Image (spheres, helix red, strand yellow):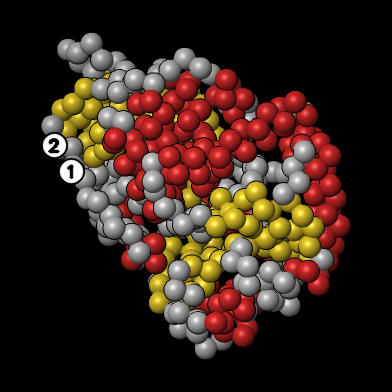
């Protein structure tokens, strides 16, 4: 069984609101043998940003995707362009030391800027809207978050994260579920599938070649060729000097070692029918929201006065038979006032997590590199990790050396046992949400 084909139609995007509102260009499959400097496996944010930056530095590249550009988590996520890493800066300072934590902060800030700048420079509208609210479902979380706002101002000169009390959060999120929080004016939300297509078009305009419906089924040493490696697809191959694995939650059997570091999990999203003025009453300032639950609820308004709401996870290879009831329950827990709203779109997606929720970046073999495990925080980070990879391959390892220092322990157990162990652990953590 392959995750690439287990829950989705071959070569077709998920039945999402994103796909319904995007004009998706279809690209050819690889049907011959081609030569290039770098073969990139995966046409999501990591792979596409790698391709953009490689071509800007004169390095040829071919991108392979088993399905479509932006088909995986990159094109079906919550669309939140967040600040920093999954560990906050205080935690990173404690684990890694202040100098490395500051370097990571600077890289994460560049990630947001790079996305906005490259889309603006090339005239792509990714529907960017500033503002993410971090909403706290327990009163005991309020003071630590407000203290963190002060920490960022004092230590990082970041004044965009502003505290919200129980009264002021209602100005942004019309729900009685939250005790306070903070709003990050330096973060925002986008249409992620449009961003993926924008990056693909920029990469192609620079000379990258992208093949869709072209699964990389194995990587082998090339024979009778000056190239070092060959990436084989069902109907062709790519001879190359270096390989970048950018398939994140869909690694399957390409590299056994990565399956120990990156664990695929599934997350689910719904989009309501048009809600009219009610949508603006729910989220008056059109901010995105992520709450403090271990299994995070995340939501925002999208075009047509609809509510996009993500919530619920599972850790098997299979999506549930029906996604809507699971997410609707979480949605009504936050917004009971839309009990009668119909759901027009419901879909799932597979992402990858690491044990400590910090992304993975490494040279995994001779001239083979991998990045992933963004753990739900990948919209910005995946792009900057791709840029770091490209710069490293071009001879500038500044960012690569910083990002590859992040500790990543293997998950316990065998490949078949890990989902069960993760389910048990996550069930325990999820129980804490109700305490």
Q: Secondary structure at mark 1?
A: loop
Badge 2: how crowded within 10 Å, few (<14), some, or many (20+)? few
Q: Is residue 124 above or below residue 316?
A: above
- Contact between marks 2 and 1 (CB within 8 A): the answer is yes
The residues bearing labels 2 and 1 have C-alpha atoms spaced at a distance of: 9 Å
- Badge count: 2
**Residue labelled with disc 2:** 31
Q: Which mark is residue 366?
A: none
- Left or right, 100 with respect to 81, comes to right
Find residue 280 and report its horizontal and vertical position in percent.
58, 76
Quarter assignment of residue 112: top right
- The reply to whether residue 105 is in sight is yes
Task: Residue at 15%, 27% (x, y): give it.
Answer: 33
- Left or right, 91 with respect to 291, comes to right
Q: Which mark is residue 28?
A: 1
Find residue 142 and report its horizontal and vertical position in percent.
82, 60
Quarter assignment of residue 294: bottom right
Q: Nearer the viewer, residue 211 or 9?
A: 211
Q: Secondary structure at mark 2?
A: loop
Badge 1: how crowded within 10 Å, few (<14), some, or many (20+)? few
Task: Residue at 16%, 33% (x, y): give it.
Answer: 236
Q: Nearer the viewer, residue 259 or 238?
A: 238
Residue that protrudes farthest toward the bottom in the picture: 340
Task: Residue at 52%, 88% (x, y): give it.
Answer: 340
- The reply to whether residue 355 is in sight is no
Task: Residue at 51%, 28% (x, y): give it.
Answer: 388
């Amino acid at each position: 069984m392959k995750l690439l084909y287990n829950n989705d139609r071959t070569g077709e995007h998920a039945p999402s609101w994103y796909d319904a509102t995007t004009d998706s260009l279809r690209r050819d499959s690889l049907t011959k043998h081609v030569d290039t400097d770098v073969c990139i496996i995966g046409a999501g944010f990591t792979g596409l940003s790698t391709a953009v930056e490689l071509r800007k530095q004169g390095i040829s590249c071919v991108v392979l995707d088993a399905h479509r550009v932006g088909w995986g988590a990159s094109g079906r996520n919550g669309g939140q362009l967040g600040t920093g890493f999954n560990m906050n800066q205080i935690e990173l300072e404690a684990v890694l030391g202040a100098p490395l934590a500051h370097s990571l902060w600077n890289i994460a800030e560049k990630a947001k800027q790079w996305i906005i700048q490259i889309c603006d420079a090339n005239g792509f509208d990714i529907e960017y809207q500033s503002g993410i609210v971090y909403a706290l479902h327990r009163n005991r979380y309020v003071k630590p978050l407000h203290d963190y706002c002060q920490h960022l101002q004092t230590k990082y000169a970041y004044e965009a994260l502003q505290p919200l009390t129980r009264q002021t959060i209602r100005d942004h999120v019309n729900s009685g579920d939250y005790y306070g929080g903070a709003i990050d004016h330096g973060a925002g939300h986008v249409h992620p599938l449009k961003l993926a297509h924008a990056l693909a078009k920029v990469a192609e305009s620079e000379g990258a070649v992208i093949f869709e419906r072209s699964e990389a089924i194995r990587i082998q040493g090339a024979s009778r060729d000056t190239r070092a490696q060959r990436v084989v697809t069902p109907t062709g191959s790519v001879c190359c000097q270096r390989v970048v694995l950018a398939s994140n939650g869909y690694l399957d059997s390409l590299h056994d070692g990565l399956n120990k570091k990156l664990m695929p999990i599934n997350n689910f999203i719904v989009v309501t029918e048009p809600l009219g003025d009610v949508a603006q009453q729910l989220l008056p300032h059109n901010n995105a929201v992520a709450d403090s639950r271990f299994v995070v609820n995340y939501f925002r308004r999208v075009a047509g006065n609809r509510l996009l709401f993500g919530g619920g996870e599972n850790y098997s290879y299979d999506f549930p038979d029906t996604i809507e009831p699971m997410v609707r329950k979480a949605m009504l827990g936050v917004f009971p006032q839309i009990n009668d709203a119909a759901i027009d779109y419901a879909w799932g997606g597979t992402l990858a997590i690491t044990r400590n929720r910090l992304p993975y970046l490494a040279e995994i073999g001779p001239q083979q590199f991998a990045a992933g495990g963004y753990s739900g925080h990948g919209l910005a980070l995946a792009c900057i990790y791709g840029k770091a990879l490209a710069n490293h391959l071009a001879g500038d390892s500044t960012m690569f050396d910083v990002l590859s220092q992040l500790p990543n322990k293997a998950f316990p157990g065998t490949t078949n046992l890990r989902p069960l162990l993760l389910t048990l652990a996550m069930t325990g953590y999820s129980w804490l949400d109700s305490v």
